Each structure stands twice: as structure tokens, then as C-alpha cells.
Image (cartoon, helix red, strand yellow):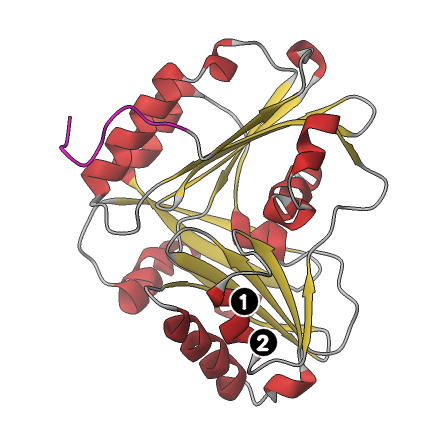
Amino acid sequence: MSPQIQNVIPSFNIQAPKIYTESAKLVIEAGPMGISFTILNTGDCFQAVLMYSFPNKLTEAEVNEEMQETLGTDPLLKRQYKEIHLIWCFPESILVPPDLFDREHSQAMLNLVFGDTRKTTISHDFLYKHNLYNVYRVPESTAKIFAEKFPAVPQTHQYSLLVDRVRKGGNELFVLFYTGSLTVMLCKEDKLQAIQNFIYNTPDDIIFHLLNVCKSFEVAPDSARLCLSGMVDKKSNLYAAIYKYFLHIEFDSMPANFTVAEELKSQPPHFFSHLFYQAICV
């Protein structure tokens, strides 16, 4: 075991006391930032969230080691579920219009943008509402780990689900925070412009990325509604830095018409809102 990797402990492990998993949906989010498990049961009630966060400087081999440790030891994975879905959140993804999409050239397109340094598995999702293809890749070694543990489960990419979040129209910058990285999605006049993941070390890094995305698509920061999700707190230095540049800031909320177990109410809804939205979309 790598010296950086000890026994993997979830950063959040919140579960209802009695979960009848045989009637539940288990949704797994997996990527270099970590693994999360969300349980949605009958009655449209979220009953559990487990989040394993990884440091942002792990090698591919170290990420795989953490994943194998988690998949092999977490008690939730030893139970039976009505259905299981896997959502990849590896950031090597591009949005392609239908007239430019060619399955045979997908690998070349990804290599052009992200380089060709490792063996990967190429996949794509069609985004019906946006008339775009999301072409993405996952390290072959990682895909193999999950294929052995969860053969034949439905798979999709996180970006393919986030783009269908309910929006209020106008200019919106949706920002999803992980430990050491953030995913940014910009909609200009309610039309999807970009979605991308960035690594950060300081709050200044975050400000740079957010302002650069706005500048690239000619969106004035004071005209954009900033919707925050994930690991960010209003009392943090990170939030204070963002507040200096954006006038309209709100925290993401729970999906309408869904409930959460009492145990999950101990944390702010925006911590897990993206997991909840993804779970109802698959």
C-alpha cells in the first residue's frame, strides 16, 4: 500500500438507521476526486450519503488503490440493491455537436485536447436537450476495477447529468466544489456554454478560473447568478473571496418533491445537492 494511502475513511458517512436496500437505488460517483455513494429509496427519499475524498495530487495508480480499498471494504457494497448506477466524473470530456461527432475519431479528439499519455476507455452520452454529444474517457485500469465489481451496470458521465439541472434562466455559473478541485458550468442566456473541472490550491486560483470562464464567453460577473454546491461554507475564506467579485450568490438546494432522512438534515443541503440531482436523473 502506498505510504500516502492508509485505511480509507469517508469524509461523510450519513445513513438512516434502517435502509431496505432491496428496494433502493444505489448511485456511485467515481473520479480522481473520490467516490460517493447515494441511496434513494421508495417514496423518493434519500436515505444515505457516503463521500470518500481523495487528495488532488494522487497518481492514477494511487487513485486506483484508494478505489479498490473502498470498493472492497465498504459495508454498503455488501448488500443487494434493486438497481445500481455508475457516474464517472473524470474531467477529460468534450462537448461535440452532432455534425462533428464521429465515434471512430473520438479518441483522436480527446487526445488532441488532453494528450495521449495512458490507456483509456472512450465513451459518449447524447444530450438530447442540448443536441450535443459528451465524449469522455476513463483510465482503462480504473474502468476494469469497476467492471469486475459491478459488471453490466448502467454508466454515464457527470457532465451529462449536470447540464440538465433545473435553472432559473439568464446567466448562471454553477460551481461544484470538491477537495482541491471545482467543476464549473456556465449557461449564458439559459444556453449551455461550457463545463469543465479545474484544480485549485488557493482561493485566488478559484477566482481566476471563475473570472476567466466568464471572460471567455463574454459574461459580466455582476450579471451572472453564482450557484454553489459541494464542499463550500458561507463562513469560509473561499466564500469570502468569491463574494468580492460576484454580486448574486446562492447555495444549491434539494430537488423538488424529494425528501431526505432525518440524519441527512444535519448538514447543509448544498453539500450533497449535486449527488441528489444525479441520482434522480439516472
* Extreme residue toward the front, this view: 235
Is residue 126 something one can see in this rendering?
no
Coordinates of residue 162 in the picture (x, y in percent): 61, 54
On screen, 98 above or below 140?
Answer: below
On screen, 259 above or below 121?
Answer: above
Residue at the spot 74% in from the left edge and 46% down from the top edge? 254
Coordinates of residue 274 in the picture (x, y in percent): 62, 48
Is residue 15 something one can see in this rendering?
yes
Taking depth in this image into account, of 270 and 198 the one nearest to the observer is 270
Coordinates of residue 23 in the picture (x, y in percent): 71, 14
Disc 1: which residue = 239
Mark 2 in CB contact with mark 1 (< 8 angstroms): yes
The secondary structure making up most of the magenta span is: loop
Residue at the spot 61% in from the left edge and 80% down from the top edge? 246
Q: Secondary structure at mark 2?
A: helix
Disc 2: which residue = 243
For label 2, the crowd category at 10 Å Cα-Cα, with few meaning under 14, some 14 to 19 and many 20 or more, is: some
Q: Which residues, given as a range, are shown in magenta?
A: 1-9
Coordinates of residue 247 in the picture (x, y in percent): 67, 81
Q: Amino acid at mark 1?
A: Tyr
